[in-house]
Image (cartoon, rainbow, N blue to C red):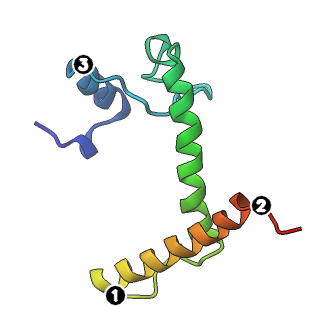
Amino acid sequence: MPQIGELGGFEFVAVLRAHNVTPHVAQNTTNRRSPIDGRTTRHPGYALSGRLRGRIEEVFGWTKAAAGFRKTHRRGLARVGWMFTLTATASNLVRLTKLVPAAA
Protein backbone atom coordinates (compact mmCIF):
# COMPACT_ATOMS: atom_id res chain seq x y z
CA MET A 1 0.00 0.00 0.00
CA PRO A 2 1.42 3.43 -0.91
CA GLN A 3 2.16 5.99 1.75
CA ILE A 4 -0.16 9.00 2.06
CA GLY A 5 2.50 11.37 0.69
CA GLU A 6 2.82 9.27 -2.47
CA LEU A 7 -0.86 9.51 -3.42
CA GLY A 8 -2.25 11.93 -5.98
CA GLY A 9 -5.14 14.27 -5.13
CA PHE A 10 -7.97 11.97 -6.17
CA GLU A 11 -6.44 8.90 -4.53
CA PHE A 12 -5.77 10.81 -1.30
CA VAL A 13 -9.37 12.01 -1.07
CA ALA A 14 -10.66 8.50 -1.89
CA VAL A 15 -8.58 6.98 0.93
CA LEU A 16 -9.86 9.59 3.38
CA ARG A 17 -13.47 8.98 2.38
CA ALA A 18 -12.97 5.20 2.64
CA HIS A 19 -11.96 5.80 6.28
CA ASN A 20 -15.03 8.04 6.86
CA VAL A 21 -12.86 11.16 7.12
CA THR A 22 -14.05 14.41 5.54
CA PRO A 23 -11.17 15.83 3.47
CA HIS A 24 -10.56 19.50 4.26
CA VAL A 25 -8.08 20.23 1.51
CA ALA A 26 -8.24 23.15 -0.89
CA GLN A 27 -10.62 22.83 -3.81
CA ASN A 28 -9.07 23.44 -7.22
CA THR A 29 -11.42 25.79 -9.07
CA THR A 30 -9.15 26.89 -11.93
CA ASN A 31 -10.17 25.05 -15.12
CA ARG A 32 -9.23 21.62 -13.79
CA ARG A 33 -11.03 18.79 -12.09
CA SER A 34 -10.99 18.73 -8.32
CA PRO A 35 -11.54 15.74 -6.04
CA ILE A 36 -13.35 18.06 -3.63
CA ASP A 37 -17.00 18.41 -4.59
CA GLY A 38 -20.25 19.59 -3.04
CA ARG A 39 -20.24 16.77 -0.49
CA THR A 40 -17.42 18.58 1.28
CA THR A 41 -17.87 22.25 0.40
CA ARG A 42 -21.50 22.47 1.53
CA HIS A 43 -20.57 22.17 5.21
CA PRO A 44 -19.86 25.35 7.21
CA GLY A 45 -16.76 23.71 8.67
CA TYR A 46 -15.12 23.60 5.24
CA ALA A 47 -15.25 27.40 4.90
CA LEU A 48 -13.92 27.78 8.43
CA SER A 49 -10.99 25.44 7.79
CA GLY A 50 -10.18 27.43 4.64
CA ARG A 51 -9.92 30.66 6.62
CA LEU A 52 -7.79 29.00 9.29
CA ARG A 53 -5.56 27.45 6.63
CA GLY A 54 -4.94 30.94 5.25
CA ARG A 55 -3.87 32.22 8.65
CA ILE A 56 -1.46 29.33 9.06
CA GLU A 57 0.03 29.88 5.60
CA GLU A 58 0.63 33.56 6.44
CA VAL A 59 3.17 32.52 9.06
CA PHE A 60 5.09 30.34 6.61
CA GLY A 61 4.97 33.08 3.98
CA TRP A 62 6.33 35.62 6.46
CA THR A 63 9.16 33.33 7.53
CA LYS A 64 10.18 32.81 3.90
CA ALA A 65 9.83 36.43 2.76
CA ALA A 66 10.74 38.62 5.73
CA ALA A 67 12.77 36.35 7.98
CA GLY A 68 14.98 34.86 5.28
CA PHE A 69 13.98 31.25 5.93
CA ARG A 70 13.50 30.46 2.24
CA LYS A 71 16.91 28.84 2.22
CA THR A 72 18.52 27.86 5.50
CA HIS A 73 22.14 28.70 6.11
CA ARG A 74 22.53 26.13 8.89
CA ARG A 75 23.27 22.43 8.76
CA GLY A 76 21.96 19.77 11.08
CA LEU A 77 18.59 19.20 12.70
CA ALA A 78 19.52 20.93 15.95
CA ARG A 79 20.67 24.16 14.29
CA VAL A 80 17.84 24.30 11.76
CA GLY A 81 15.36 23.54 14.56
CA TRP A 82 16.82 26.34 16.66
CA MET A 83 16.58 28.77 13.74
CA PHE A 84 12.98 27.74 13.07
CA THR A 85 12.08 28.28 16.74
CA LEU A 86 13.73 31.72 16.66
CA THR A 87 11.93 32.63 13.43
CA ALA A 88 8.55 31.42 14.76
CA THR A 89 9.09 33.45 17.94
CA ALA A 90 9.84 36.56 15.87
CA SER A 91 6.69 35.93 13.84
CA ASN A 92 4.63 35.67 17.02
CA LEU A 93 6.09 38.94 18.31
CA VAL A 94 5.20 40.70 15.07
CA ARG A 95 1.65 39.34 15.25
CA LEU A 96 1.38 40.22 18.95
CA THR A 97 1.91 43.91 18.23
CA LYS A 98 -1.22 43.83 16.07
CA LEU A 99 -3.30 42.16 18.78
CA VAL A 100 -2.39 44.38 21.71
CA PRO A 101 -4.04 47.82 21.54
CA ALA A 102 -1.65 50.75 21.32
CA ALA A 103 -1.17 52.90 24.43
CA ALA A 104 -2.84 56.30 24.17
Amino acid type, residue under disc 2 in the picture: Pro
* Count of picture labels: 3
> What residue did someone put label 1 on?
75
Task: Determine whether the residue tagged by mark 2 lies in a helix, strand or loop.
Answer: loop
| CA separation in Å, label 2 and label 3 | 44 Å
What residue is disc 2 on? 101
Residue 45, can we see it?
A: yes
Against 12, residue 85 (above or below) is below
Quarter holding the C terminus?
Answer: bottom right
Looking at the image, tell me whether mark 1 or mark 2 is earlier in sequence order. 1
Looking at the rendered structure, the secondary structure element under dot 3 is loop
Q: Is residue 33 at least partly visible in the picture? A: no
Q: Residues within 10 Å of mark 1 (few under 14, many from 20)?
A: few
Q: Can you give x and y, in whole percent of width and height, for residue 56 in the image?
A: 53, 51
Q: Secondary structure at mark 1?
A: loop
Q: Please provide percent x and percent y for residue 81.
A: 35, 78
Q: Which mark is residue 95?
A: none
* Earlier sequence position, callout 2 versus callout 3: 3
Query: Does 36 sit above or below residue 56?
Result: above
Question: With respect to residue 91, does 15 lie above or below?
Answer: above
Q: Residue at x 65, y 73 (%)?
A: 66
Give, as a three-letter code, the residue at label 3. Asn
Image depth: mark 2 or mark 3 in front: 2
Q: Amino acid at mark 1?
A: Arg
**Residue receiving disc 3:** 20
x 50%, y 16%: residue: 43
Query: Which quadrant of the rendered structure holds the N terminus?
Result: top left
Question: Mark 1 or 2, which is nearer the eye?
Answer: 2
Q: Which of 39 and 8 lies nearest the eye of the viewer?
A: 39
Does residue 62 sit above or below 42 in this rendering?
below
Q: Nearer the viewer, mark 1 or mark 3?
A: 3
